[in-house]
Structure formats: structure tokens, C-alpha cells
Image (cartoon, grey):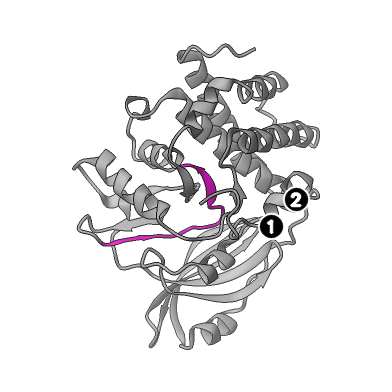
Amino acid sequence: MTGDSKKDNAIEQFAVTLPRRCAPELAVSSPPEIAQAIGSKIIKALPLQHNSDSFIISLETESAGDWIYKAKCGPEIEPRFYRETSSGLLPEYKIIREEEFRYEILLRKISLPPLTETRGGDLPHLMETIASAVAELDAPVFLNLSTPEKWRGFCEVWLHRLGEMKSENLFPDCEDSVIKLLANLCQDARLDEAFADNVGFIHGDLHPANVFTNGQGGLQVIDWQMPLAAPRAFDRACLLERMGVKIEDFFGAPEIIGMKLTRLCCCLLTAWCLPVIDVARNDRYVFSLASDIISVATKSGFTIK
């Protein structure tokens, strides 16, 4: 995946000028409408997640198997991703609604065990296998962050937006001094090392709960809201860390800092667009990431001030 790929998403061209609260409120279909989309009566529904920007339920049907229903609002490309990507990594899907910044989608429930149930074994090797399989996809990207210049420009914009959102009493724990440290850090030329090799398609937010594998070749991955063109080490480092592995043993500071800053700024972009956000939940996430980034940079000898 290169910066010239025809599958780069158009959002890249206006990500820096997205209007505040441009996403509409969440829209959720009625049970009869969801049943009609599946083509079978729903006999059991189990809520999995419900907040201001997403509603997810697990469905058991009379004659069409088990499905996951997902309603989302925000700047994401998941329906387009499924439409334009053909791969055994992806489950069967049905799109119910697709609007700008809002959609509803059905995903066939995956029979493989989630990665959260994996115990023991060579986790770094397994993470490499998963990230490599993702990297082979010919798929659209949410943003092209494949060069230091593009990545740095993206971070500059959304760290600045963080300051603007603070004026609305959002992200209260992230002090102005912390924002300044992060903005200065992303200018450090040493972070360019993360882009020196193996840049291409990545999932962007790999988590053990959205990866399903039997460890014997069976593999499927979900939650394709914001795939990126970026250093592939970002996917491996993100997934390993979420599996409880000390990623400093496998990656250098540029890859770790770059991965965490990217996640932070994608979170800020989403918060910027949503009409309503869970202030406490988002504040904890952003503050935790910001603290981690500064800690890694300080321990690695970066001068940030």
C-alpha cells in the first residue's frame, strides 16, 4: 500500500478540516428490520456494547445462524472496507445502513476462539503471523500515514484539536503542559526511524478481542473502522502490548511512541466528530496514552520540554 494507491480514502483530504460534531447521532434499526435484513426470525438477543457512538448486540436466529449487529456513528470506513475487500480474514457481512459518518452492519458470528483465550505458546511469533496476514490485504485505508511527513502533519493537527476540545471541558486530565510535550515530541526526527522499513497496510487498532484464531491456520479479524497505511510495526506492537507482553523487548522507542501517538490522535479525531462523547471514558483513555508516551520517551533518552 502506497500513498498513491487508488484505495486511499477521501477522508485523508479533509481530515484536517472536519467540522466539529459533524457526525449524526446513532441510528439503530428495530428488531423486525434487523430480522428482515438477516432473513430469519431472531430468537435471542444479547447486548454487548451500548454507548453514545456504538450499539452492538449478539443475535441468534431461527434459521440463519448467529450474527453480530453493529450500529456506529463517527468518521469510519467499515462498510466500504467490507465491500471492497475480499479475504478469508473477514466474516460474512450485510450492510443495513450506510450514510456519511453513520452506519449499521451485520457480521456473521465467528466460530473460531478469540485471541483472548490464547494461553502460552510463542506469542511474539503468533502476533507476527497475524500482523503479516493483515498486511497482505488489498483494502481501502482510512488515512495514509505512510511517511514521516504525513504522520507528523496528522499528529500536529489533532494535538492542536485536543487543546481546542479542552476549552469545552473535554479531556480535563490532559493538562496544557502535557499537550505541549506531545506536540514537541512528534517533531523529533528520531521518530522517522519507525518509517525506515516495512510501511504498508495495517489494521490500526488490533486487539485480542477482535482477532479469532485456532492457532492452526484458522484466522479472522474484525473491527475495521480505521485501517491505515503506516509502519507495520504499529500493528504488532499494539497487539503484543494488549496481550500483556513487554513490547520494549521487541520494538524500539520510535515504533512504540509512533504507535501510541497514532492511536491517541485517531481517538481525538473521533471525539472531535461525535455529537456526544463519554467524557470520563475518553479522558481516561487519552490521559493514559499520553502518560505512556511521555514515560517511554523519557526512559529512552528523548529530550521533551
Labelled pair 2, 1 in contact (Cβ < 8 Å): yes
Examine the rendered structure and indicate whether residue 39 appears above or below residue 275.
Answer: below
Q: Badge 1, how many Cα within 10 Å: few under 14, some, many 20+?
A: few
Examine the rendered structure and indicate whether residue 12 appears above or below residue 251.
Answer: below
Q: Badge 2, how many Cα within 10 Å: few under 14, some, many 20+?
A: few
- Circle 1 residue: 10
Element carrying mark 2: helix
* Picture coordinates of residue 21, whole percent (x, y): 77, 51
Element carrying mark 1: loop
Looking at the image, residue 124 sits to the left or right of residue 54; the answer is left
Q: Can residue 196 be seen in this view?
A: yes
Name the residue type under label 1: Ala
- Circle 2 residue: 14
Quadrant for the C terminus, please.
top right
> Which of 192 and 299 lies nearest the eye of the viewer?
192
Bounds of the magenta segment:
218-231
> What number is the disc on residue 280?
none
Q: Say if the magenta span includes residue 221.
A: yes
- Residue 184, picture quadrant: top right
Q: Say if the magenta span includes residue 170.
A: no
Name the residue type under label 2: Phe
* Picture coordinates of residue 209, whole percent (x, y): 39, 52
Residue plotted at (41% across, 25% down): 252
Examine the rendered structure and indicate whether residue 282 appears above or below residue 96.
Answer: above
Q: Can residue 276 be seen in this view?
A: no
* Picture coordinates of residue 271, whole percent (x, y): 68, 46
How many circles with numbers are drawn on the protein? 2
> Which of 261 and 141 lies nearest the eye of the viewer?
141
CA gap, disc 2 and disc 1: 8 Å
* Picture coordinates of residue 257, whole percent (x, y): 51, 28
Residue plotted at (50% across, 60% down): 139
